[in-house]
Amino acid sequence: MNAESGKMKKDPRNYNTPDKQIMGVEHVDNIARAVLTLTREVAVLTDRVLVLETLLEKEGVVTSEAVDTFQPDDTFQKRADAAVSAISAGVIAALQGADRD
Amino acid sequence: MTNAFQDPELRQRGRASVDFLAQMAVAAGPVRSEVDEAIAEKVSDPDSLPEDLDERLAHMDAMLADVPGYTTQKLMGDWHGRMHGRLSAEAFEEVQDDLAEAFAKAEQGPATITLNPDREPPAYWDGVHFHRTTGGWEGHEHMGYIHGEIIHKKIVGRFFPGGIFQQRRNVAGMAPRDDYARILDMGCSSGHFTTALAQVYPDAQITGIDLSARMLEHAWRTANANGWNWQLSQQAAENTDFDDGAFDLVTSYIVLHEMPADAIKAMFAEAYRLLESGGDMLMSDVTRYSDMDKLGVWKADRGAAFGGEPHWRESASLDLAELAREAGFTNVTTSGPYPYVIQGHKA
């Protein structure tokens, strides 16, 4: 029996939300990688919303195939690049602690 | 939808994913600036850095440990290294069905391919994930296509003003003659430099060799799609089955840094053997460590250490001109810094 479980036994309410550290320092890099992986998913979804907006404005009704096979022109590409660049810059700044007060 | 064999249109998820990889590099600009400013402040004299390259890596890591941008730069580089192959494979798989017709057509044509699945791959290559490509060059049934058409054209190509093919054509055109009849491209991979050779020397019979079956398959389809009669075979450049004097030009494009010194020496000797009297050698590779200051070498060496380049340090430290002369070449010339081009003549 370790100190943590001993403490838990003293007060049964400690079982409500057990105080346990899950992630060790050896997991920090994986968490950072997960952040970047999620950033990619946000970027993909942002692009998809931009495609939807563009096609809806042009066609009124769109199919998922039309969204999947949409090929950007220069105007769209610049808009998408700017949106993804802003998302990436925000995540990069946070990773550097640049969002601290 | 149907798709073109070369430079295919990607579907939304794959297209946005490769765009993200490219935009991450753009967004990392301020991080690079921050790290460069910290280095300028902390390293007043690059000559004072440790001579030993491992010590220099450790020294710079310790010196920059408190620079937030340096940690972020390492993280982003690592993520890109781990993910670019996976994301590109995913983007390919989304359009694989769309490409079926183009693939079928590209398997008919004048090019030939000879694979040798029973070969003994050299230890310096076998199981190595060069460029941290997921699973290595043989890690996906269509790795040649993924590498040649998606990674190179849709990610790497964005960072080469004028395009990666113009750079290759410029190098191909550096050979001293324009009437070569039989050209061998050593380490031809998916056929990018071979394409430049075909464009610069349209009347030559071009032969390409590489260790990777998956890369050769893409070169073969590329040749067929363009009507080129390339003869492709799976062989090590340092030990081929061609006759003495079979070629009048032997080339390689930025493959030497994927080989250790003894293999490069053997490759130069093989190139000399394969050239007829009066033939030329035209090879190229990354910037020599001897042409950079200690900071430049540290940056290149660190990039290699974490970029899936196990032989870069050994290879980039070689005096290629000296090796070419030792192999028997005369009129040896070099130019650089990147690509570093070395030429020689067989008297």
Image (cartoon, rainbow, N blue to C red):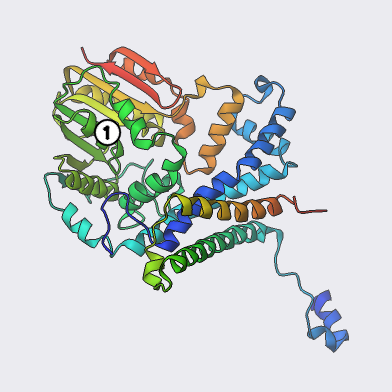
- Toward the viewer: B200 or A8? B200
Query: Where is residue A42 drawn, in percent x and y?
Result: 57, 63
Q: Residue B183: x and y, percent?
A: 19, 29
Q: Residue furthest bottom?
A: A12
Residue B134 drawn at (x, y percent): 43, 54
Can you say whether B153 is above or below B298 in the image? below
Query: Residue at coordinates 36% horizontally, 31% vertically from top-left?
Result: B167
| Relative height, residue A34 to residue B253 (above, below) | below
Q: Nearer the viewer, residue A99 or B343?
A: A99
Residue at the spot 72% in from the left edge and 35% down from the top edge: B63
Q: Where is residue B136 shown, x and y percent of the image?
A: 39, 50
| A74 or A39, nearer to the observer | A74
Q: Chain ID for label 1?
A: B
Q: Is residue B128 above or below residue A50?
A: above
**Figure quadrant of the N terminus of chain A:** bottom right
Q: Amino acid at mark 1?
A: Ala
Which one is nearer the viewer's eye here, B233 or B73?
Answer: B73
Measuring 61% from the left and 27% from the top, which residue is drawn there? B295
Say few, some or many: other residues with alpha carbon within 10 Å of mark 1 (under 14 / 14 to 19 / 20 or more): many
Tell me if B233 is positioned left or right of B141 in this view.
Answer: left
Q: Name which quarter of the figure residue B249 lies in.
A: top left
For disc 1, the marked residue is B196
Residue B310 visible in the displayed image? no
The quarter of the displayed image where residue B325 is located: top left
The image quadrant that residue B101 belongs to is bottom left
Examine the rendering and report whether any part of residue A77 can be seen: yes
